[in-house]
Image (cartoon, rainbow, N blue to C red):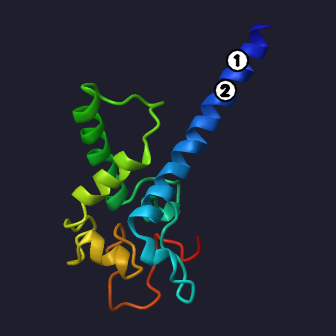
Amino acid sequence: MKALSIITALFFITIGQASAKVNFIEALVEKYPSVIDDSENGKLLDCFTCHTVDKWQRNDFGLELQAEIRAEYTAQHGQAPTVSTVYDRDLIKTALTKIEDTDSDGDGYTNKVEIESNHCPGDYKDYPGVADSRTNCKTEF
């Protein structure tokens, strides 16, 4: 019985984590719908918008977004989020709006300009005017 309880708990934790990842991608798609229609040039909005290809660490954009999401969650709920907190899409979109005008990767272009021009806001080597330079963003969704 104890083993069944542990398996059940692990199942729901895994489902929650998968759901959280979907919420991030859905929030990106809702916030920046014009990018998702760019089928000729590929799609930026995937996990690698916020993560590096190696080891799934957050890139500079992902770190800034994470900090803003935590701050927004704390402001809304009066307490800091926990490891198992699942963020809703509206909270994620609010955080995205708050960091649109910053330049997370320090390449001279704001996050919003990079996302809307199908470039990675967390990769300083990828910016408008540079073709196929993505090192941390995939081009397929």
Looking at the picture, tell me which residue is in the foreground, 36 or 8: 36
Look at 41% across and 54% down and name the residue there.
58
Give the structural element (helix, strand or loop) at label 2. Answer: helix
Say few, some or many: other residues with alpha carbon within 10 Å of mark 1 (under 14 / 14 to 19 / 20 or more).
Answer: few
Mark 1 secondary-structure assignment: helix
Q: Position of residue 84 (x, y in %)?
A: 48, 30
| Count of number-bearing discs | 2
Q: Are marks 1 and 2 in contact (CB under 8 Å)?
A: yes
* Residue lying at the far top of the rendered structure: 1
Residue type at tag 2: Leu
Occupied quadrant, residue 14:
top right
Q: Relative to the observer, which residue lies in front, 138 or 124?
A: 138
Q: CA distance from mark 1 to mark 2?
A: 6 Å
- Residue at 60%, 44% (x, y): give it: 18
Question: Does residue 13 appear to the left or right of 30 in the view shown?
Answer: right
Image height of 113 relative to 3, above or below: below
Q: Residue at x 20, y 65 (%)?
A: 102
* Disc 2 target residue: 10
**Residue type, mark 1 in image:** Ile
- Residue at left 50%, top 57%? 26
Please name the residue that numbered disc 1 is placed on. 6
The x and y percentages for residue 33 are: 44, 71
Dot 2 surroundings within 10 Å: few (below 14), some, or many (20 or more)? few
